[in-house]
Structures are given as C-alpha cells and as structure tokens.
Image: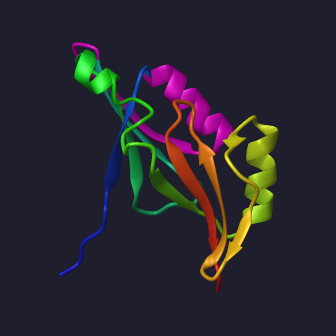
Amino acid sequence: MTQHLGALALLVADYDEAIAWYTRALGFELIEDTDMGQGKRWVLLAPPGSKETRLLLAKAKGDEQASRVGNQTGGRVFLLLNTDDFERDWQRMRAEGVHFREEPRHEAYGTVAVFDDLYGNGWDLLELKK
C-alpha cells in the first residue's frame, strides 16, 4: 500500500490575502484556484519543488471557525516547512517580513526556527541533518 498526505487544510480569513502572503513571504506556488460557488474556492498552494503535499486554504465560515484562524493547534507549532538550505530561506523570509519567534537553533535532528504565518499559526522552518 502507498499513501501520502495530499493536502492540509488551513483556515484563513480571506483567500486573496492568504494567497498573496504565502506566495510572497514563503515563495509558495499557487497550484489551483477554482471558484466553487457561494463564496467558496478550492485553493491549493505548494512550497517550491514540492511534488505531493499541498496546502488547502479554507476560508473560515461562521464564528466557530473564525475563532480558530491563527490558532488551529492551541498555540503549538502547526506545520513544518522543510528546506534544503536553512540559511537561504531564513534570510529571504526575514527580508519579506516574516516574524520569527526565535533565532535559529541547532538540534540533534537539524537547524530549526519557529515563525508565524500571517494569522499567527506557528510553523517550523527546518533543515534536517543529512
């Protein structure tokens, strides 16, 4: 059997605002943006060079979902963005105004720093040791 995570849904306040931020600040590619009617869109993004996993932007609907935008995991790091060159991406992301919660750390598994997306969700920028 072969499986993989195809997409992870991320609650956002606004599709266009989120698309602009993820493509500019993180360099993600817009894979698909399809109007589904009634204000819904199917929006898929992917990090540069990603072959399988996508980020599905899901516009929050109603008060309950809106209350979770930026806090989908109770403040814990939500997603891990792996890179082949931590220093390159850390410098580029900082130049784009991405807020890092900490300076880079060198751990047994690799180099990592936590950053916030535009809504405050925590992410790891991570270069694994080879």
- Whether 7 is drawn above or below 20: the answer is below
- Residue ranking furthest to the top: 38
The residue shown at (34%, 49%) is 8
Q: Which residues are magenta?
A: 15-39
Picture layout, residue 58 above or below residue 14: below
Q: Is residue 85 visible?
A: no
What residue is rendered at 44% in x and 20% in y?
A: 14
Residue 21 is one of the magenta-drawn residues = yes
Is 26 left, or right, of 10 in this rendering? Answer: right
Q: Is residue 80 left or right of residue 98?
A: left
Residue visible at 46% across and 54% down in the picture:
79
**Residue 31: percent from the left, percent from the top?**
45, 43
* Coordinates of residue 87 in the picture (x, y in percent): 79, 62
Q: Where on the picture, by quarter, is residue 37?
A: top left
Would you say 65 lies left or right of 16 here?
Answer: left
Q: Quadrant of the C terminus?
A: bottom right
Asked if residue 101 shows in the view, the reply is: yes
Q: Is residue 65 magenta?
A: no
